[in-house]
Image: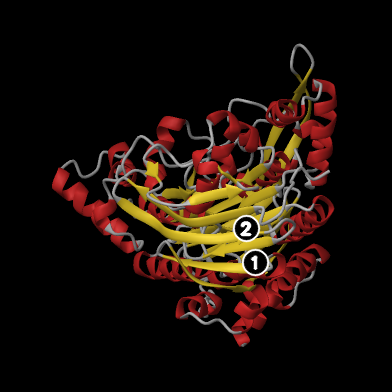
Amino acid sequence: MNKATGNGPLLQVENLSVAFRERVVARDISFSLERGETLALVGESGSGKSVTALSILRLLPPAGRHPSGRVLFQGEDLMQASPDTLRQVRGDRVAMIFQEPMTSLNPLHRIERQLVETLTLHRKLSKEAARKEAVELLDLVQIRDAESRMSAFPHELSGGQRQRVMIAMALANKPDLLIADEPTTAVDVTIQAQIIKLLLELQQELGMAILLISHDLALVRKMAREVCVMQDGVIVERAETEALFRAPQHPYTRHLLAAQPQPKGEIKTDGAEILSAKNLKVWFPIKAGVFRRVIGHVKAVDGVDIDVREGETIGIVGESGSGKTTLAFGLLRLVESEGPILFMGRNIDKLKRRDLRPIRREMQIVFQDPYGSLSPRLSVAEIVSEGLDVHDLMKDEGERDAAVVAALTEVGLDPETRHRYPHEFSGGQRQRIAVARALILKPKLIVLDEPTSALDMSVQAQMVDLLRDLQRKHGFTYFFISHDLRVIRAMSDRIMVMRGGKVVEKGTADQIFENPREDYTKALLAAALHLEVAHLEAIRQ
């Protein structure tokens, strides 16, 4: 049964402003949300969407404050609520799916403990009943082998699986209001379609309201009844969804709707071989019993052949948990693997850690979760220059600072922000910092693990252009992992399709997109096309 009572809007935000120290990042935000309805906040990275959502539950970091405004939930002003009242509201009447599941899940606790804790805290279930319901929730959000996954730690799950665990935790107590901050960012197109269907079904069943924060305009058009467009901390346009997509009024809204990564055009596959592997395997042992005997293996990567050439981009696609990221980690020797690996003509699969260190300057990685991979204790300048310290380069402070400024400028960030800390930046800005940290060493190979997943449509297109420009300028070779097939096509020379740890199809980008052979590849492309139809129709208006 829905817990909401009373008349009037379920949520009413009135003239809300958000500031960090003296800098105002959102100004006079006002909107209301009825029971059972979905309102979307859209806008570029850094426009103020997420801080507005966090303000509803008063979850801003200590430096954040509210110069003005009220947040009325069922008529009660949460800005004035006591800590006890907020504890009752958070996770029960109002739940939130956070943008970065790896930093929102406790890395020291297994999934079972985190799900069961949510259920026992608010619903007073016994541990046995809570555990049974937790397994059902994981089944509900399409996590395979839910029973066995209960014992996993967050780092043992893929990005998409962690996102689905977050969704399960948010839905556990059947909230009146679900705040969904980029709920499908880390998941592939097939799982995205399943999650959209799941959220819509639960919304109808529970009468749940949804505040959706997303850069995915196809998702917004599919889920939201009304849209607020934010730019530089201000709502510049508000309209019913169909009216906004059919006839956007504000120039910024038209800019968002028109943004699309452009096809790559030129194809490069004739450079010298940079990296190759034969029959590569990454198997993780499954242990059980008092003595933790190995009773089986998770075959995350199971017999993959790959070669990557100088200046080329290899795109890797597949469902969440298919082995894409593990393949990259295995190639870079970040996890134990089996099978020969050649990097720049040298066999690296048997090298010890000490011998690998000089080689690592030539192979860098941009991780999927930019917040989790950036130390909160270091400034941006310290983060970007960290590789220079590790490899004992540029000891002169002036030279180091100039290199940091150049790297931040290349990725489109204001170098004057280099003395700030990661929490002061949006998700998209943090991803640019991660790219700057990789490119400052001018490596031969860069692994890009979902580098555009945290970015809105317009910034995605800018990032694709940026990465291609950097590749042309510096001759980088990219190993590009993404669930976004538009971005994959815009970036890739060749594409490998993975499923269950194996490569099921590979070929040039044109071959894969225009003439796929395998049913699985066809299903991926069909799901992507289905989700994009609304967005493409809007662009043609």
* Tag of residue 267: none
Secondary-structure class at tag 1? helix
Q: Tag 2: Cα neighbours inside 10 Å, few (<14), some, or many (≥20)?
A: many
The residue under the point 21% across, 45% down is 394
Q: With respect to residue 255, does 426 lie above or below?
A: above
Q: With respect to residue 204, does 234 lie above or below?
A: below
Q: How is the image coloured?
A: secondary structure
Frontmost residue, 383 versus 377? 377
Q: CA distance from mark 2 to mark 1?
A: 8 Å
Secondary-structure class at tag 2? strand
Frontmost residue, 365 versus 370? 370
* Picture coordinates of residue 445, whole percent (x, y): 45, 55
Q: Is residue 339 left or right of residue 421?
A: right
Q: With respect to residue 433, does 135 lie above or below?
A: above
**Residue bearing mark 1:** 220
* Picture coordinates of residue 16, whole percent (x, y): 46, 54
* Picture coordinates of residue 533, whole percent (x, y): 70, 77
Q: Quadrant of the N terminus?
A: top right
Q: With respect to residue 480, does 125 lie above or below?
A: above
**Residue bearing mark 2:** 212
Residue furthest front in the image: 7
Q: Are marks 2 and 1 in contact (CB under 8 Å)?
A: yes
The residue under the point 69% across, 68% down is 225
- Give the amino acid type for the residue marked by disc 2 in the picture: Leu
Frontmost residue, 42 versus 189? 42
- Give the amino acid type for the residue marked by disc 1 in the picture: Val
The residue under the point 50% across, 47% down is 55
Q: Is residue 21 visible?
A: yes
